[in-house]
Image (cartoon, rainbow, N blue to C red):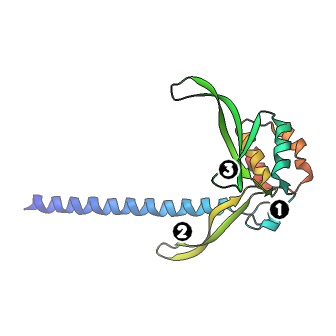
């Protein structure tokens, strides 16, 4: 009889441990999500990154961005998205394996950009969202939820620099980065 009770106690104890682990993982996930969400649309050098007017800086038309990118790297080419004409892609042709493993020059997508006018800095778009409060478990609160962005031309440059398809110093000179506003996000993306 004691063996049965001990087995039941052990099973209850294991269930309680499993519940506690699951609860801790859930609380940790909520905190991580909260931090990532805040970082996604945090202010940039004191400017709200969700305000188009604060992020506009020196806007450039797609044609001008492409012209300057080609001065930095003449191997780029550009295509307007068929599924969303408001977006364009920056590509490069490089040797990539085909379905048989043979290296052939194929286009490789590098990054996306706006097809119309690009602000200097990316604008984050948010909507209200009800989420668990990370500092008070069991309570709920409202916060802005990131749903997309209007990509700024500096973000395009930073992504191309990070993928090593663009030299930072050349891009700074051609895009006249030093004459623009300061940006914490730009600094973080390019250092």
Give percent across and percent down for residue 146.
Answer: 63, 64
Give percent across and percent down for residue 11.
Answer: 22, 60
Foreground mark, 1 or 3, reads 3
Q: Residue at x 52, y 76 (%)?
A: 140
- Determine whether the residue tagged by mark 1 lies in a helix, strand or loop: loop
Q: Residue at x 68, y 65 (%)?
A: 125
Q: Residues within 10 Å of mark 3 (few under 14, many from 20)?
A: some
Instruction: Give the numbered dot on residue 56.
Output: 1
Instruction: Give the numbered dot on residue 81.
Output: 3
**Earlier sequence position, callout 1 versus callout 2:** 1
Which quarter of the rendered picture does the C terminus lie within? top right
In 3D space, how far apart are the residues under numbered discs 1 and 2 (Cα atoms)?
33 Å
Q: Residue at x 54, y 68 (%)?
A: 134
Q: Circle 2 is placed at which residue position?
A: 134
- Determine whether the residue tagged by mark 3 lies in a helix, strand or loop: loop
Relative placement, left or right, of 142 versus 114 is left
**Earlier sequence position, callout 1 versus callout 3:** 1
In 3D space, how far apart are the residues under numbered discs 1 and 3 (Cα atoms)?
23 Å
Extreme-top residue of the structure: 102
């Amino acid at each position: 009889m004691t063996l049965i009770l001990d087995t039941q106690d052990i099973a209850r104890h294991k269930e309680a441990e499993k519940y506690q682990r699951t609860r801790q993982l859930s609380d940790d996930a909520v905190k991580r999500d909260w931090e990532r969400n805040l970082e996604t649309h945090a202010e940039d050098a004191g400017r709200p990154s969700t305000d188009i007017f604060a992020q506009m800086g020196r806007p450039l038309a797609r044609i001008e961005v492409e012209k300057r990118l080609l001065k930095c790297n003449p191997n780029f080419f550009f295509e307007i998205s068929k599924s969303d004409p408001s977006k364009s892609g920056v590509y490069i042709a490089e040797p990539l394996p085909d379905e048989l493993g043979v290296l052939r020059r194929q286009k490789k997508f590098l990054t996306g950009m706006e097809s119309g006018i690009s602000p200097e800095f990316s604008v984050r778009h948010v909507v209200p969202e009800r989420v668990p409060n990370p500092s008070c478990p069991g309570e709920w609160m409202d916060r802005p939820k990131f749903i997309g962005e209007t990509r700024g031309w500096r973000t395009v440059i930073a992504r191309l620099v990070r993928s090593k398809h663009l030299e930072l110093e050349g891009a700074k000179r051609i895009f006249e980065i030093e004459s623009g506003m300061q940006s914490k996000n730009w600094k973080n993306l390019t250092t």
